[in-house]
Amino acid sequence: MTKFINASVITYGIAMIAFGGLGYAEKGSAVSLIAGGVVGVLAIASYFVWQKNPRAGRIMGVFVAALAAGNAAKSLAGGKPFYPQGVVLILSLLMIVILGMGHMMSSKGRD
């Protein structure tokens, strides 16, 4: 499960960077580029934090995904189109679920 979670975190980070670049390319939005880049880099950084401190790395990953999900939900509620904000919301919620399942599975052995 750990390999799957790690691959998911890296893939999520790359996807967020890509969506930021897409926002800049399509709309000229520097805010999208910066936000997507920051979220993506922080998600990937959470993988490297995980290598030294697994709990802190996973908490960081959940926090980053929750911030991205909240921002995407706010944009959707404000009337922005589903693409790309809805995709970011779905990916971020999926990342939170994956990290949560990983936490529950690792806690199960400690009972």
Image: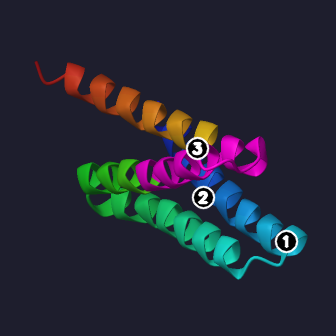
Using the image, tell me which numbered label, if any, was put on residue 19: none
User: How far, Cα to Cα, is label 3 from label 1?
Assistant: 20 Å
User: How far, Cα to Cα, is label 3 from label 2?
Assistant: 24 Å
Residue position for label 2 = 13
Q: Start and end of the magenta stretch? A: 65-88
**Which label's residue is closer to the chain start, 3 or 1?**
1
Query: Badge 3: few (under 14), some or many (20 or more) residues near its Cα, within 10 Å?
Result: few
Mark 3, secondary structure of its residue: helix
Q: Which amino acid does label 1 sit on?
A: Lys
Query: Badge 2: few (under 14), some or many (20 or more) residues near its Cα, within 10 Å?
Result: many
Q: Which amino acid does label 2 sit on?
A: Gly
The answer to whether residue 61 is left or right of residue 37 is left
Near-viewer residue (92 or 44): 92
Dominant SS type (magenta) = helix
The answer to whether residue 3 is left or right of residue 104 is right
Residue for point 62% across, 36% down: 90
**Which label's residue is closer to the chain start, 2 or 1?**
2
Query: In the rendered view of the protein, which quadrant contains the C terminus?
Result: top left
The answer to whether residue 63 is left or right of residue 65 is left
Using the image, tell me which numbered label, if any, was put on residue 77: 3
Q: Which amino acid does label 3 sit on?
A: Ala
Residue for point 78% across, 67% down: 23
Residue position for label 1 = 27
User: How far, Cα to Cα, is label 2 from label 1?
Assistant: 21 Å
Measuring from the top left, give residue 106's x and y in whole percent.
28, 29
Near-viewer residue (110 or 55): 55
Of the two numbered discs 3 and 1 in the rendering, the one whose residue sits closer to the viewer = 3
Mark 1, secondary structure of its residue: helix
Q: Does the magenta stretch include residue 57?
A: no
Residue 89 quadrant: top right
Residue for point 36% across, 59% down: 51
Of the two numbered discs 3 and 2 in the rendering, the one whose residue sits closer to the viewer = 3
